Image: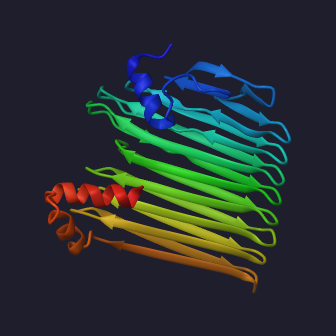
Amino acid sequence: MLDNIQKKILEEVADLHKVPEGAYNIRANSQMAGRNTTANIDITTKEDKSGIDIRVKDGTKNESVHIPVVISESGIKEVVHNDFYIGDDCDIVIVAGCGIHNCGNQDSQHDGIHRFFIGKNSRVVYVEKHYGEGDGSGKRILNPVTEVYQEAGSYVEMEMVQIKGVDSTYRTTKAELKEGASLIVRERLMTHGEQSATSVYDVYLNGKKASTDVISRSVAKDFSEQIFEANIVGNTECHGHAECDAIIMDKAHVVAVPKLDANDVDAALIHEAAIGKIAGEQLIKLMSLGLTEQEAEEQIVNGFLR
């Protein structure tokens, strides 16, 4: 059973107010806190290391899988391996995410290593949210590793969100796409205090007419630091686009590192990056409507990260 703190974190990272319908695996303080499988989606515990295998049958449509992680004890450090085997012609939603509540003086850390094997012509929407809270001196650390292997004609849409409370994160994502496959990534990130966040995306477009669109929107406040790296490799006729759009505030530090690698004359690759402060005219306009400067900044930041 989950306590009230764990339930609150679960709402933050997975939008769950009750036990979800369909398949799910809930992990709390390094233990399984609940699991359900369906006729088309099976979840099993790994025997050789910490983690689970999720297997989705061919042709599964309009089903979901929830695999949230909750840590509410100080000092927990874990590495979890989750593998997803998605059959052909599927259409599913996967909701992951990790929330850490740390009121102690020891660091709490979750490193989730997720591998996705996407079948032909399947469509997957993956949502991953990270959240931290608690007034302890111990840090809240999240280091997700994601690997995506897409068969021909598959489509994957990934929403990566981290808005509050994570002291340190190092996110790495690697994807390999076959013919006609498409990968869409939407990252939303905010750091404050002395937090640090690094996101590294490596996408290999190996099949003809494969495509990717990787877009990061971020806000860096106070003394925090962000690093965004996007590496798109076009090995045949393909299309790749990466974009970093960041608002920098106070004494923060933001770095955008683009890398495009074209190995074929028909590889069309584009990178865009923009880093800047909030425009003065935006603040003035909102303040003329009765908002304070702080309220105006919050409105602009919230709209930017929506």
Q: Which residue ends up furthest to the front in the rendered image? A: 289
Q: Is residue 43 left or right of residue 59?
A: left
Q: Which residue lies furthest to the top in this view?
A: 1
Residue 204's spot in the image, x, y percent? Answer: 70, 66
Task: Give the side of residue 181 with respect to residue 88, left or right.
Answer: left
Q: Is residue 3 above or below residue 20?
A: above
Q: Nearer the viewer, residue 117 or 58?
A: 58
Q: Which colour scheme is used?
A: rainbow
Question: Looking at the image, which residue is at 20% across and 69% down?
Answer: 285
| Residue 261 to residue 71: above or below | below
Image quarter for residue 223? bottom left
- Residue 209 lies, in percent from the top left, at 78, 72
Residue closest to the eye, 230 or 76: 230
Is residue 178 toward the left or the right of residue 135 in the image?
right
Residue 115: x percent and y percent? 69, 45
Q: Which of 96 and 225 is in front in this view?
A: 96
Total of numbered circles in the picture?
A: 0
The answer to whether residue 287 is seen in the rendering is: yes
Up/down of 93 relative to 36, above or below = below
Taking the spot 34% from the left edge, 41% from the top edge, the residue there is: 165
Residue 223 shows in the view:
no
- Please provide percent x and percent y for residue 247: 33, 65
Say which quadrant the C terminus sits in.
bottom left
Residue at screen point 48% across, 62% down: 216
Q: Residue at x 84, y 53 (%)?
A: 120
